[in-house]
Image (cartoon, rainbow, N blue to C red):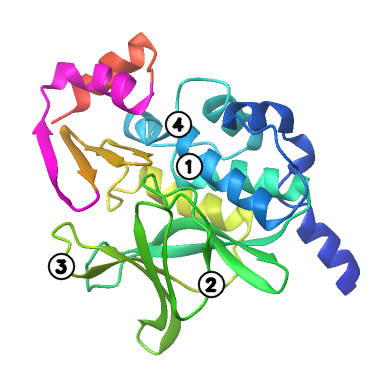
Amino acid sequence: MSTTRRHKETHRMWNGDALDLDAYLAHLGHDGDRAPTLATLRALHRAHVLSVRWENVEAVLRKSRSLDLTSVQARLIGSPLGGTCFEHVTLYAAALERLGFRFSAIQGRVQMGATSIRPATHAMVVVELEGKRWLSDIGFGASPLEPIELTDATDTTDGVWAYRLRREEVTPGADGWALYQPTDEGDGWLVRHTFTLDPQYPIDLRVTNHYGASSPQSPFSDRLVAQRIHPDRRHMLDNRTLTTTRPGVRPETRELERHEVPKVLADVFGVELPVDDAALLVSKLT
């Protein structure tokens, strides 16, 4: 296969032509420029993070999550439901492809301060613009509100939340990148996740997504997690523990009763479950 043909097939692999781009941008509230520029990337990244919901209910209830674009669109922009990083990146990559951005999907290891080697189960996007590379991590749940320039000395803030990016050994003998965030106590930094720049393709995301949704070893196959970020606070629901974090303030936590969970999902996270799914979820909570 020629290099030109391979590049063309790679360029359209995210199925951007099948995306309802107008519906996606309307969901984001984006009516600005669609040219593939840094300004457009920043606007799309921020709008996606603030408006597309993050939850893993489908995995908890059915041990599966579909990544075909039709299903992802229907769930993330056609209903009051959400998804994990794999659905988010599937949708976002289709939009970037349709708009003419040059990018690669990558996967990373979520550490959150852990020192052991964790599985590479977090999907992100790296975008190339004007000779620079930008980490566009829109699917973390509590994602940065702006893309982060990929350099070895990036210390940045999106206006409220601070991040630090460093090049370092991420597994024994393998160099990569580590994204840091401040500790909850505010007295240092912890590694949020590590990653390399090895390009990932839709088939790679489908494999990792299957593990995340169905494996007993996956933390997301049987434990409810929902996340939402605002410019001034983050919310996270881990099973029945609701945590609210604000910059420079110790997190607030509250243990919910099982029957409270569907209402909190709707009121705090914007996730409105069908009645039958809400009842089934309550029955599965511990």
Callout 1 amino acid: Val
Q: CA distance from mark 3 to mark 2?
A: 25 Å
Q: Nearer the viewer, residue 247 or 79?
A: 247
Q: Characterize the local packing of mark 3: few (<14), some (14-19) or many (20 or more) Cα atoms within 10 angstroms.
A: few
Measured as percent of width and height from the top left, residue 17 is found at 79, 39
Measured as percent of width and height from the top left, residue 279 is found at 26, 14
272 falls in the magenta region: no
Q: Which residue is mark 3?
A: 187
Callout 4 amino acid: Gly
Report the magenta residues as a range.
247-271
Left or right, 134 with respect to 94, comes to left
Q: Earlier in the sequence, mark 1 or mark 4?
A: 1
Mark 4 or 2: the one toward you: 2
Q: Which residue is mark 4?
A: 82
Measured as percent of width and height from the top left, residue 25 is found at 66, 32
Q: Quadrant of residue 104?
A: bottom right
Q: Characterize the local packing of mark 1: few (<14), some (14-19) or many (20 or more) Cα atoms within 10 angstroms.
A: many
Q: Quadrant of the C terminus?
A: top left
Q: Quadrant of the N terminus?
A: bottom right
Location of residue 159 with respect to 178 vertically, above or below: above
* Image marks 1 and 3: residues in contact by CB distance under 8 Å: no
Location of residue 179 with respect to 216 vertically, above or below: below
260 falls in the magenta region: yes
What residue do we see at 12% from left, 26% from top?
256
Q: Which residue is mark 2?
A: 150
